[in-house]
């Protein structure tokens, strides 16, 4: 169940669905073993020699798939991320989606890289139970903006997988058949389908980009406003002091804490941790959020840490016990004086 203002997420996103786009769209499913299966939908009967994609269940099983609408603006991305998490929990924890079914991660993309990457799910139903399809339709009608496109997959007599794409309009019980197609397995491309979208989806290239995401969360997560207030108190370009900064990174249970304390004592240095104490009390809250929001939180806490490092390094050496990917933000904020920032990678 979503915390704080869940209904605000259910306002319309972009209404275009990858399942309804032309046949140049490609699909990727992540199996439980983390192996990726690639396929596309074809209107012809060529390539019958190809084995069916392994993500689809043999008879009498049935599979379903759908994608969330593409999200472009920070507001749409936040809503889509939280909606995706809600659907994931509902599909994995609630009946009738529990026993005999599984929800696998699905990506839809265009080889031309012009269309947005879309996320969704492939739902496997071993029992082919009527209540599974009925409950799935009700869930999608309730949570996704109309029209919703639901793909239904079945293995035909000859062993090939056939897809029927249905259009669901609002809360009505009627559905309209959009197309029928054959499912064709595809070899894994040399470049992962998500690579072209990594800068938009996984990396915040500026303080402002991360800030815009957290701004959209303030009505849902009150702590987001407190984080933004702390970030606004940080200078845009903090100036590092003359003392060295040492960032120590290592896996848990390798003695990193012992080494950190020893270096601190020997240099008479100030010990700073990432994330800093001013925001560490909110880690659990943001760790429970979708990846987009969680990364925005940690990106902004790194800017807070960089500001603290700049201030502390004017008085003494600084040791940073690094818990998250902090080094890039520290380097970016401290500029050319980063030459006196050192990183120690510690392992057994």
Image (cartoon, grey):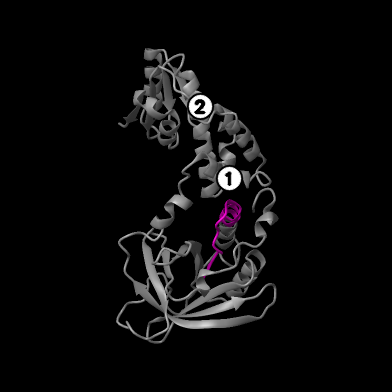
Find residue 118 and report its horizontal and vertical position in percent. Answer: 49, 63
- Residue drawn at x 64%, y 64% is 143
Residue 39 visible within the image? yes
User: What crowding class fits label 2: few (fewer than 14 Cα within 10 Å), some (14-19), or many (20 or more)?
Assistant: many
Find residue 237 and report its horizontal and vertical position in percent. Answer: 49, 29
- SS of the residue at dot 1? helix
Q: In this image, 48 relative to 210: left or right?
A: left
Mark 2 — residue?
307
User: What crowding class fits label 1: few (fewer than 14 Cα within 10 Å), some (14-19), or many (20 or more)?
Assistant: some
- The one nearer the camera, 321 or 99, is 321
User: Dividing the picture into quarters, in which one does residue 229 lie?
Assistant: top right
Mark 1 — residue?
212
Gap between marks 1 and 2 measured at Cα = 20 Å
Q: Quadrant of the C terminus?
A: top left
Up the image or down, 167 lies above or below 142; here it is below
Q: In this image, 5 relative to 345: left or right?
A: right
């Amino acid at each position: 169940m979503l915390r704080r203002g869940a209904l605000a997420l259910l306002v319309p996103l972009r209404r275009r669905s990858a399942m309804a786009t032309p046949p140049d769209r490609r699909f990727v499913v992540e199996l439980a073993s983390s192996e990726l299966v690639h396929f596309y939908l074809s209107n012809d009967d060529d390539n019958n020699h190809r084995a069916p994609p392994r993500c689809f269940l043999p008879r009498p099983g049935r599979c379903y798939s759908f994608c969330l609408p593409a999200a472009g603006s920070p507001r749409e991305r936040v809503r889509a991320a939280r909606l995706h998490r809600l659907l994931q929990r509902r599909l994995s924890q609630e009946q009738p989606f529990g026993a005999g079914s599984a929800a696998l991660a699905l990506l839809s993309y265009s080889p031309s890289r012009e269309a947005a990457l879309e996320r969704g799910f492939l739902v496997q139903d071993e029992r082919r139970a009527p209540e599974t399809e009925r409950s799935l339709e009700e869930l999608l009608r309730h949570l996704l903006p109309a029209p919703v496109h639901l793909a239904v997959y079945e293995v035909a007599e000859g062993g090939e997988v056939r897809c029927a794409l249905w259009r669901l309009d609002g809360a009505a019980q009627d559905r309209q058949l959009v197309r029928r197609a054959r499912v064709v397995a595809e070899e894994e491309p040399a470049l992962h389908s998500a690579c072209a979208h990594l800068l938009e989806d996984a990396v915040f290239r500026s303080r402002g980009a991360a800030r815009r995401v957290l701004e959209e969360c303030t009505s849902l997560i009150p702590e987001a406003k407190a984080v933004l207030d702390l970030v606004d108190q940080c200078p845009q370009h903090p100036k590092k002091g003359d003392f060295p900064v040492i960032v120590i990174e290592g896996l848990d249970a390798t003695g990193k804490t012992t080494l950190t304390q020893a270096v601190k004592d020997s240099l008479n240095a100030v010990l700073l941790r990432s994330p800093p104490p001013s925001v560490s009390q909110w880690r659990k809250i943001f760790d429970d959020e979708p990846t987009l929001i969680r990364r925005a939180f940690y990106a902004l806490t790194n800017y807070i840490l960089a500001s603290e490092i700049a201030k502390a390094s004017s008085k003494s050496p600084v040791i940073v016990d690094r818990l998250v990917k902090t080094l890039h933000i520290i380097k970016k904020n401290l500029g050319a004086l980063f030459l006196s920032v050192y990183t120690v990678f510690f392992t057994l």
